[in-house]
Image: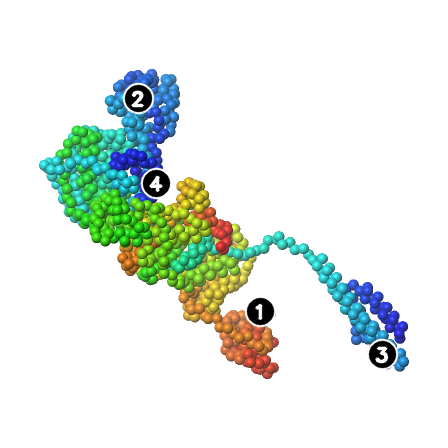
Amino acid sequence: MIDKISSIEKEVKEKIANAKTSVSIEEIRVEFLGKKGKIIDILKNLKSVEETKRKEVATLANKLRVDIENKIEDKKEEIKEKEYENKINNAKKIDLTLPTNLNIGSLHPITIVQKELEEIFESMGFTVEDGNEVETEYNNFEAVNVPKHHPARDMQDTFWLENGQLLKTQTSAAQNKIMKKYGAPLKAIFPGRCFRNEELDASHENTFFQMEGMMIDKDVSIANLIYFMKTLLSEIFKKEVEVRLRPGYFPFVEPGFELDIKCIYCDGKGCKVCKHGGWIELCPCGMIHPNVLKMGGIDPEKYSGFAFGLGLSRLAMMKYGINDLRILNSGDLRALKQMYIK
Amino acid sequence: MFISINWIKDFVDLEGIDVKDLIYKFTMSTAEVEGIVEYGKDTKDVVVGRIVSVENVENYKKLHKLLVDIGNEKINCICGAPNVKEGINVAFAKDGSLVNGIKIKKTDIADHESNGMCLSEKELGISEDHSGIIILDDNIKLGTDIKEVIPIEDVVYEIDNKSLTNRPDLWGHYGIAREIAAITKRDLKPLQVEDLEKYNELKKLDINIEDKDECYRYSAITIDNVTKKVSSYKMKTRLTYCGLRPISLLVDMTNYIMLELGQPMHAFDKDFIKSINVKTLKDKEEFITLDDTKRSLDAGTLMIYNEKNPVAIAGVMGGQNTQITDNTTSLFLESANFNAVTVRKTASKLALRTDASSRYEKTLDPELTKLAVGRFVKVLKQEDSNIKVSSSFSDLYLNKYPNIIIEISREYINKKIGVEFTLDKIVDILTSLKFIVDVKENDLLVINVPTFRATKDISSKADIIEEISRIYGYDNIVPQTNLWKVEPVRKEEIRTLEYGTKKLLAEKFGLSEVHSYVWYDTKLNNELGINTHDNLKIVNGLNRLDSTLRYNMAPTMLYSVYKNIKNYDEFGVFEIGRVFEYTNKNENCKEHKVLGIALSSNFKSEETLLFEAKKMVENVAKIYKNIKLEYVENLHYNDNFIHPVNSFAIKYDNTILGYISLLNPKVRDKINPKSNIVIVELRIDLLADIKNVDVVFNEISRYQTVDFDFSIVVDSNVKYKDIENVIAKSNLSYLQKYTLIDVYENKLKLKDKKNVTIRFTIGSYENTLNKDQIDEERNKLIDTLKQNNMIINV
């Protein structure tokens, strides 16, 4: 029996040494240590061993069993390690340069610019308001100091509607409603779509976006307006801008200004964007006309304020270097998809 | 409007002032300058010469060989002008000289050497006249540079008319000169005018104003013995440079005074005028204006009548019947002031905007009429010394503007501008602009507004603030902050929803935002077979076809799909736009904010697309409102592009928020038969109004749950929602959730039935359910389903 044990030992060690795979090592385990395994068999049949040798055989067999168990475990580890090594070494090298489908759509450039501006204004304590697109003649003109038959009506070609309403020509059409809604003091911006009855070309659209703002409080001065616009525009263009005011005539402000910024592309040296003048005409603004305040229910003796208009379409064009205004309303995704999300 | 610096120099000494710098200052203090032209810069070495001999050129009837004496030499040239004559003085451009940029060179004409040319007015650039050469005064020294004889050298700048809308006083050179005097701190020279008082003895003209609100003042004078027919070169040059065509002395005179003072004038042939009446037309009438155009005038048009016949459209244009002709030697000069609104209305109705009407509509100062007559006579005398004034200055001045006095304190001014002005500084500025200022106690200023600013321009303190700050210079104001009250910003729900929706659709679902027009494109509607019904219309659109405002979003979204479909196999577009509801004629329309979506794919099935659209809508509803939407029979939307079977109204509570629909194949095929297209319209404004459902935290059960799948056999027309209703009805005690696993349809095996597999999860929050409890739940569910003809295949 002792011989048998040593021959089993020899056999099993040989087999373990030769085992190559997890499967074959498992087969070895079953062959020798399984329920009917050769080593287990010896232990099960100790009774048949003569009494005197029984203890020695048992000890030997048990020792062999433990020894083989360990060997198998070690071998298993070794094989697993090798198998991982093989797996890793044989892994297919993935070509990560293959393209992915982002499936990102795009926001309209106006939305992007408008959102950016709204965030700046919100951080400065402005309420964001929304106006109508179809307006009454009163709100669009009379309430902003442009009575019927006033020559200033020529400044804006108007789309008139059959019911006497109109497509708003300017965001100022919301001024009256907003003043009546909030009263003074007031800080509000109101972006929106505006319409002019014009033929289309690269720089004229009948449908475009403006953003207008109003700030009304006690003792608001021209010096305050300049300070505010400078701060605001520096924030918008993300750099310190230099501004200048020129007289400009807009019936709802008095005095009215054209605000220019020193060309941000050439620092005022003169380039294509500023038409070599060094300044870019950017936004009309001014001190709100006392009549406009009065019509909005605000006492012009007590309060004053300023208003300003920003051309969102224009700013979007500047931001993305778009040279044809018509692209914005074209619905052409080959153009619009270039503007992404932010 | 064009401003000639030479003309300005008549009134302000600009010695030592750089003209470009001056124009810049004007831009910064008064009005926008659109351009500057330097005239005469490109004309050099044109001199006065005398034709000493004229010879015919053989074989050329029209040509003459001239010998021209230019003082230091005599030059041969060939000239084709009909008015050449021995002994006349001409403007001569010799070989090597420059005429408006063109180099004059020695050349051969008809085999004769020509060493220069005699210039016409057109060639010199002072008028359009090319009928002959310029003939100059006899007494000018030969060889004198033409620039010393005719003021061709000038700087002319153009002001943007829009920026003068509120400044009636700036529609003439004298007003601009006044402004420039204030800007440059120089004196404004008084205007040289004829003393009209000296004609008081002459007969008064018969003038009547019948419509007294329409005509504020009518002044007139008659002048006889006009012998000259053409204006001086100086006058012609100025008119030309300022954009008006010289015509004849009398017409040019009225234009000249208008450009100088801003007061339109009209010269009638005196022979035709007996008595003037200003009144409106009683009936429609046809009238031929002096541009030889027959115009239909409406009743109510303000006219100038001679006795019983209309002779001019007041403030707009004179009539052909009484106009100045070549034979006119006596004129009746009108200098009037009409109601600005009346003139504006007439001019726009006739679509006849004239230099006169565009001035009148700005509300001119009636004081100007007399000044203009005085100036007219003065200047006309300089042009033609033979003229005789033949009537007294006849003047009917019915409506005087009230004198405007504004009281304002220094403190107020300084507060509103944000600059510490001294009293002297303020008074200086206002006085330079011809305001009369009286200083009272406590630095209170009592300001008398000059008449030329008092018609509508200056009426309040804000106007005074503007005057002071613009002349002081906006650039000189130091920016200042102010301690404004800071309040939390209220943000309207809809703005968050709008931006959120846009971001979600673009980022998560890969759609692209587009902007469309708010009116239908009739051509595209026809092309795609989209029907839209009548709605609010634009009445004056440039393209009359496209005048109907949209009442839904889908068509404009489909335009965009149509435009892009050739470039993309699969894409989606969206817009949050306005639609207009116009149900009651002549009432104000209602405006709604609607999200429009269109999805198009060449490989996804219609059903897949429909569910993608549903997913988008539900994402918005879940994320921004935490609500669950329902889909019901679409009874509200019946446009022809909507699919008659597969279109579903989106409902929440009792509100229909919009719909999701396959595109009707009839329209789809027009866009692209290979594409599947789904459209969505969602009332984002209604959605914004819905109250947000609070999120309530459900405790996580510590006890085990049990899952089981039921395969439920139902008729194929049974909706998932029907099954859900039955599940709800079964009133299970421990149902935690259920999830749809699969829907199996197979016409062959199941015929008109389908299998819907749902996984139910049950569990208690108090203990682990035992077998009896679980069986009880299962049986309750099975029984209820069975009662509703839903059979379980276990």
Q: Which mark is residue B742?
A: 1
Labels 1 and 4 in the same subunit:
yes
In the rendered image, which residue does mark 2 sit on?
A: B143
In the picture, the quarter occupied by the C terminus of chain B is bottom right
Front position among marks 2 and 3: 2
In the rendered image, which residue does mark 4 sit on?
A: B24
Please report the residue visible at 34 percent of the width from the left and 19 percent of the height from the top.
B77
Labels 3 and 1 in the same subunit:
no
Please state which amino acid type lies under the numbered disc 1: Asp
Q: Chain of mark 1?
A: B
| Disc on the earlier residue, 1 or 2 | 2
- Give the Cα separation between the discs numbered 4 and 2: 37 Å
Front position among marks 4 and 2: 4
Asked if the residue under mark 2 is in contact with the one under mark 4, i.e. CB atoms within 8 Å, the reply is no
| Disc on the earlier residue, 4 or 2 | 4
In the rendered image, which residue does mark 3 sit on?
A: A45
